[in-house]
Amino acid sequence: MENTESLKKELSSCVKCGACQSACPVFLQLKREHGVARGKFALIQSLIDGEIEVTERFAEVMSQCVLCLSCKETCAAKIEVEQLIPFARHEVLKNRGIPFKKKIALSILSSKETQKKIIFSLLRILDPLFLKKITESSGLYYRFSFFLERGRFIPGLVRKPFSDRYRQPLQGDTKKPKVFFFPGCMINFVYPNIGESAVGILKKMNCTIIFPKEKNCCGFPAFASGDIVASKKLAEANLNEFSKTQFDAIVVACATCGTAFKKIYDYHFKNQNNEKFSRWNEIKKKIFDISEFIIEFGKQDLSRKLPISGNQQRVTYHDPCHLNRNQGIRHEPRELIALNRSVRFKEMRFPCSCCGLGGGVNYANYDLSIEITKRKAESVRDSGAQIVATACPGCIVQIRDGLHRYGVDAKVVHVVELL
């Protein structure tokens, strides 16, 4: 196993108190259904010590992690689970390969943008063959009738990606920050409306906005799946892209992209030459989730420019794991919601519980994934909210799916769309 000494050091601090298992949404679900005898950390330790090999059962257990970091939050030793699980999955990948569906998804995400556009254009043409259209009122657009699980709902691919809408820089006040806006794959090809809202807010803040010429994936999906090599290549491509121009801040509206930049790239570059590592550390200081960027640089100006509507709707908020636990950003999105005086905020029960999408579980075990979403759907229903706001496009997909499946009538949006 790669980085064995580093992993041994992490695991050696485990006191085997079981707090991680008590906090894990996947462990609790599996325990209710089947009973679970050993935790993931114990299995990884046994693999490192040579006591077990990579078997089908080991691969299955390692696939059952949403990387929500609930375990790390309760762990006295703060074991780096976000490093342990991907590297354990890397061993599975080397020994058993990547499951077919996940392999296709990762291949698409890791490809160049020009290739992605061709692939997504073909997928839109093939939509009627594989997908069944449903009502717009659900907030979701298609139901798979082939290839993926029947009954799974996904959003449709857009005809015009975000990258085709903004090619040239948008000039703002030279006294305001110059912002490099990184859209990420989901905003680019699925939810360009989120990107439009983000750009609109940055324009209201009078920022100069520039966009990447080469729009690569952040690399987190590959890393989470154990494809460390592909993730590292994407990290290096983005490092080169960010190094081509001058800016005051890199702003992202995707919690997953933000986690890749702020956390995962450290794993890739710390073992590189000092020049790359130091260059990335300088860039990392300028990376902001859009919620923290707005609160830090434009809260007062923006609040004066927002219209007030007499028709107040009740809004609740879901904390994405990649934003809350990975980046420590919890209050800023709620402050953004508070800027909109046309809504009433209602905190749901368990706002920080995982939606069930992360860590590739949605691909590896959809039934388990959507069962985890049930708790979130029930929390939304009990809040009485008409709108669920969040800060992660991936969470939007999963929560929309869950609300439709469990009969909860609420709209799901990104927080920037409320402004």
Image (cartoon, rainbow, N blue to C red):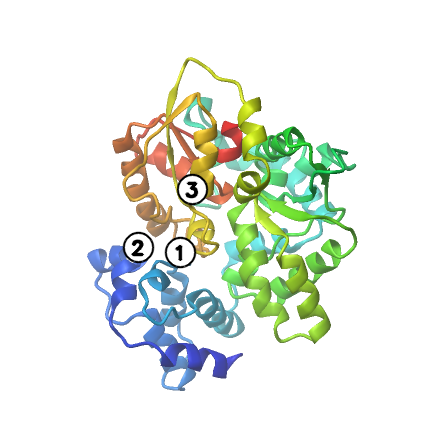
Mark 2 Cα-neighbour bin, 10 Å: few <14, some 14–19, many ≥20:
many
Q: Amino acid at mark 3?
A: Gln
Whichever of labels 2 and 1 marks the residue nearer the N terminus, that label is 2
Q: Residue shown at 48%/68% (left/top)? A: 83
The span from disc 2 to disc 3 (Cα, nearest Å) is 15 Å
Q: Which mark is residue 68?
A: 1
For residue 223, above or below residue 198? below
Residue on which the image places disc 2: 25
Instruction: Estimate the x, y position of residue 374 in percent, counting from the top left.
Output: 30, 42
Q: Which residue is mark 3?
A: 398
What secondary structure is found at the residue carrying circle 2?
helix
Whichever of callouts 2 and 3 sits on the residue coming sooner in the sequence is 2
Depth check: give the residue in front, 127 or 50. 50
Residues at marks 2 and 1 touching, judged by CB atoms closer than 8 Å: yes
Q: Residues within 10 Å of mark 1 (few under 14, many from 20)?
A: many
The answer to which of marks 3 and 1 sits earlier in the sequence is 1
Are discs 3 and 1 less than 8 Å apart at CB?
no
Where on the picture, by quarter, is residue 270? bottom right
- Per the model, the C-alpha gap separating discs 3 and 1 is 14 Å
Circle 1: residue type: Cys
Residue 408 in view of the camera: yes
Give the structural element (helix, strand or loop) at label 3: helix
Compared to residue 404, the image places residue 296 above or below, namely below
Residue 288 relative to residue 86: left or right: right
User: Which residue lies most toward the bottom here?
Assistant: 50
